[in-house]
Image (spheres, coloured by chain):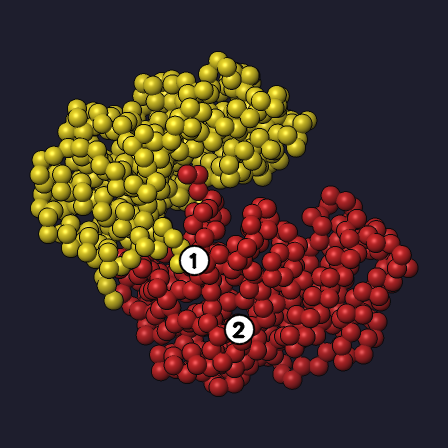
Amino acid sequence: MNENTILLAHGSGGKLTRELIKELFYRYFSNSTEIKDADSASVNMKTSSLGFTTDSFVVNPLFFPGGNIGHLAVSGTVNDLAVSGYLPRFISTGFIIEEGFSLKELEIIVKSMAEEAEKAGVQIVTGDTKVVNRGKCDKLFINTSGIGELVEGYLGVGSPEKVQPGDQILVNGSIADHGMAVMAAREGLSTKGLQSDVAPLNRLIGRLTDAHIDVKFMRDATRGGLATVLNEIVEGSDMSITINENDLLVNEGVKGLCELLGLDPLYVANEGKVVVVVAEHDLDKALSIMREHTLGRKTRHIGAVASENPGLVILNTQIGGNRIVDMLAGDQLPRIC
Amino acid sequence: MMKFIDEFRRADLVKELLHKIKSESIKKIKIMEVCGGHTMAIHKFGIKSLLPDNIQLVSGPGCPVCVTDIRFIDTAISLARLSNTIIATFGDLIRVPGSTSNLNQEKAKGARVQIIFSPLDALLLAEKNPDFNVVLLGIGFETTAPGTAVALQEAKAKKIKNFFVLSAHKVMPPAMKALIDEEVGLNGYLAPGHVSVVTGSGIYDFIADKYKIPVVISGFEPVDILKSIYHIVQQFEEGNAKVENQYQRAVNPGGNPKAQLALNNVFKLRNDWWRGLGVLPNSGLNLNNDFSQFDAEKVFSIKVEKPKEPKNCLCGLVLKGIKEPKECPLFKKLCTPVNPVGACMVSNEGACHAQYRFGLSNTKLSLI
């Protein structure tokens, strides 16, 4: 290809489209499935109990410390399947590209998607590209959908129905890394000490399911952060959750920026963190299994489910007090003074 | 470890202070804080859950967003609707309800509303967009007003023609006096930490001297707040009343002379309307005659209708610490952070929002 930017013609289905698909998408997304160059991909699944999910990615900026929109697009969909008890297998990807977008940047993003897919052991098997006039979309939007095979014994683990008092809560590491890294990059603040945690969690989760750990519920703590997931578990139920501030892990750089802006790390997005609720008898085993994996080395046991104070999420503060951690209303806004 | 933060969050120091407070605090005492930062910190650390029952901590009008009257929002909205105008505002303000709309809704309808972190960001916005008028919504007390003053001084020096300020800046002491005059029944003031960094401690002398109410300037960490409460309790039990500075690592008795100079150079005092308190004499800061070319009120003669206060909203009484948020008939039913009726519910620092998020202030949770 001679051009270095995306033109409207790249999306029109003609010669430039063919070139783009072959030299960029096929080049990086080629996999063991022979490229058939058809309108649909043929895939074989081992079971008819399938998980199916979709997500769209519009992050700004496209590149941030620790990753880019491509990493998010693959891991986001992989994780939605994995936390719901499905083994992620195949991904589709749709690109909506603004006319004038840099081909070099697109290549970096596509390459990142391929690398992330390899890390997760999934295949990107079908896709679509559209190019829109300048100003009709913000540089690049990506949609990915994914299908996965049900992991036996874990049907419904993505809903909190099986959670009960006495269950214990784990998180595989530090919170608020992604949201703060993106915010700093977007607002032109120093990104020192900040790095997105974007990562595919299916292999970490696979370790738990392989060991038949009694996992009652899982969810990745993306938009709205850890606090939102915990509230989603107990909202309208007869249970409560208590977590301990001293057991939460927040990296120094993240802590500093949150303090400066008056933001609460509990509500900031993560892209490589899963909340795992396990039966009490499996707590120690689950902890040690998670800590054996690179993405779970810093797993923390943050709290437990109880029956007092139904519907509430309570934080035991670091100074020995307590307060309620409510559902976020709207976006967190930086403080004035 | 974060210097100046972690040391002041030590659980052992907190325990020690609580022990002292509990052993010396006998009489019923009502302490008011008048700073949004204190409201947040008290709730965030769960300080009320640790204090003995005879100590009542109330939130006063310390949230700059909450005391900003509806007319200001309506004016800002009218400005936002002008075709070549960018409104630069601090985050909280975009959700404050005006008579019929708010800035967030106007943004969704196409108005140019930009959230900024500092007044200098707004000036930069004006420099980068010479074809637009940039209006900075100047709210905040003595903490943030110097920032606006500096931005205006720079705008004047650089001869920038498209930068304006709509000021709702206010000063604290008149409000603190009004609350005592209203006989809210206060026995002590936690004085605002960051305001005091700018003003120094002298502005509170009249409260101790004339009204015999103890005042302690407090920092924002749990150890700061508890130490300040302890000092107020001590004074109260002994029948004393003086101004003490607990926040000595940041507050000098004379304050920050440079900031004060900037304020005096740019602003003049005027009578101003405080939501919940009404008009307070010499309580507002407006641009003086040397900076009138930047005064959005003068330059854009916007006429707004008489503002409509929402029915049954108790923001006024909440801001005075007379009513708790949960006593407002709209609290949690019609007035929530997602759909706020009054300003106290909008800002994170507002008493109603804080109570909604962090729980009922005097409810002891059944501990697990």
Chain ID at mark 1: A
Question: Which image quadrant: the N terminus of chain B?
Answer: bottom left
Whether residue A5 is visible, yes or no, is yes
Q: Quadrant of the C terminus of chain B?
A: bottom left
The x, y position of residue A139, in whole percent, is: 71, 50
Residue at 76%, 61% in the rendered image = A107
User: In percent of the image, x 59 and y 71: which residue is there?
Assistant: A200
Mark 1: give few (<14), some (14-19) or many (20+) Cα within 10 Å: many
Q: What chain does badge 2 belong to?
A: A
Foreground of the two, A89 or B198: B198
Q: Residue at x 32, y 18 (%)?
A: B281
The kind of residue on which mark 2 rests is Leu
Q: Position of residue B252 (x, y in %)?
A: 32, 35
Q: Amino acid at mark 1?
A: Leu
Chain letter for yellow, please.
B
Residue B279 falls left or right of residue A14:
left
Under tag 1, what secondary structure?
helix
Q: Is residue B131 above or below residue A64?
A: above
Residue B233, percent from left and from top:
15, 42
Q: Which residue is mark 1?
A: A266
Numbered mark located on residue A295 in the image = 2
Instruction: Please tell me the numbered disc located at residue B246.
Output: none
Chain with red colouring: A
